Image (cartoon, grey):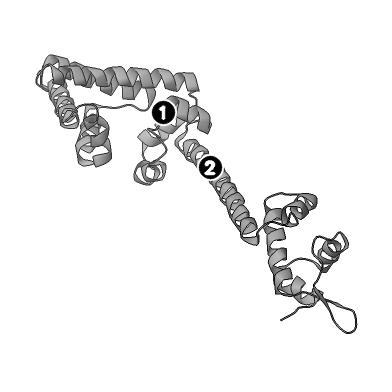
Amino acid sequence: MSFSVGEVAKRTGVSVRSLHHYDAIGLLTPSGRTRAGYRQYEYDDLVRLQQILVYRELGLSLDDIATLLDDGGDPLHHLREQRRRLTDSIERLQRQLTAVDKTLEARTMGIQLDPEEMFEVFGDDDPTRHAEEAEQRWGDTDAYRESHRRTSRYTKEDWLRIKAETAAIEEQFVAAQAAGLPATGDQARAAAEAHRLNIGRYYYDCGYSMHRGLADMYVADERFAAHYDEQSPGLAAYVHDAIHANADHAEEPG
């Protein structure tokens, strides 16, 4: 089959003016002519046009495209080259999309850091992974709103300090567990109290009842449990028991 300029323009979305220009510069010259002298595009012409459009989408100039297509190489080589360039472009766009998504999620959580700073502070432990879920579960609570208000003011240096303090508290739990100390003992309860105060200092007021609820989540939600158990097997349950023991001790009469 052969197609007129108008038919090719309609099928491909390329303007008639552009097709005439491609012909004028020798980039895409129709293989056939009608008896009246009108341009007629054959199958191979349409294949070449497809290649031109792909390279244009990738940002190549018409001169560069002509060089690529007219070097006398194997047509399969050109197709493979197109595929490679498209794959590279998709990967680049995907990285950009991921960076934008992380920034959006971070802003939703009140974290005013760009993706590079996010990685510097949190590494692979991305705090935005569950941003949408957190907003759905707790978005209407005073604690969530207070946490959002506070964290929206934190700089990278603030987050690095908070991360270091949090890690030091978790090390207290690890040390107490490793020493064989009971979760109800003084050292474990001291770590639990430091944990509670850390939340209150940087995120939201955390009373003993709320702290109990967090402790329950640390063992009920496998994602939180994994955070602790990766540091030391059974640590999630140990932290849970220490927090409850600390709350019981604080709430004892007298």
Q: Quadrant of residue 83?
A: bottom right
Identified at 68% across, 56% down, the residue is: 73
Q: Position of residue 13 (x, y in %)?
A: 73, 67
Residue type at the position of mark 2: Arg
Three-letter code for the amino acid on which mark 1 is drawn: Phe
Residue pictured at 39% horizontal, 33% vertical: 124
- Give the total number of marks visible in the rendering: 2
Q: Residue 188 or 142: which is nearer the viewer?
A: 188
In terms of sequence position, does the residue under pointer 1 or pointer 2 come before the other? Answer: 2
- Quarter occupied by residue 142: top left
Local secondary structure at mark 1: helix
Q: CA distance from mark 1 to mark 2?
A: 18 Å
Task: Examine the rendered structure and indicate whether residue 26 appears above or below residue 156.
Answer: below
Q: Is residue 173 left or right of residue 202?
A: left
Q: Quadrant of residue 7?
A: bottom right
Q: Nearer the viewer, mark 1 or mark 2?
A: 2
Camera-side residue of 87 and 42:
42
Question: Would residue 98 be visible to someone looking at this image?
Answer: yes
User: Which x, y percent locates residue 54?
Assistant: 67, 57
In the displayed structure, does residue 153 sit left or right of residue 37?
left
Residue occupying the point 77% across, 74% down:
41
Label 1–label 2 contact, CB within 8 A: no
In the image shown, does 113 or 125 lie closer to the viewer?
Answer: 125
Specify few, some or many for label 2: CA neighbours under 10 Å numbering under 14, 14-19, or 20 or more.
few
Q: Residues within 10 Å of mark 1 (few under 14, many from 20)?
A: few
Residue closest to the eye, 68 or 55: 68
Secondary structure beneath dot 2 equals helix
Q: Is residue 160 above or below residue 27?
A: above
**Residue under label 2:** 95
Location of the N terminus (image quadrant): bottom right
Q: To which residue does mark 1 refer? A: 122
**Quarter of the figure with the C terminus:** top left
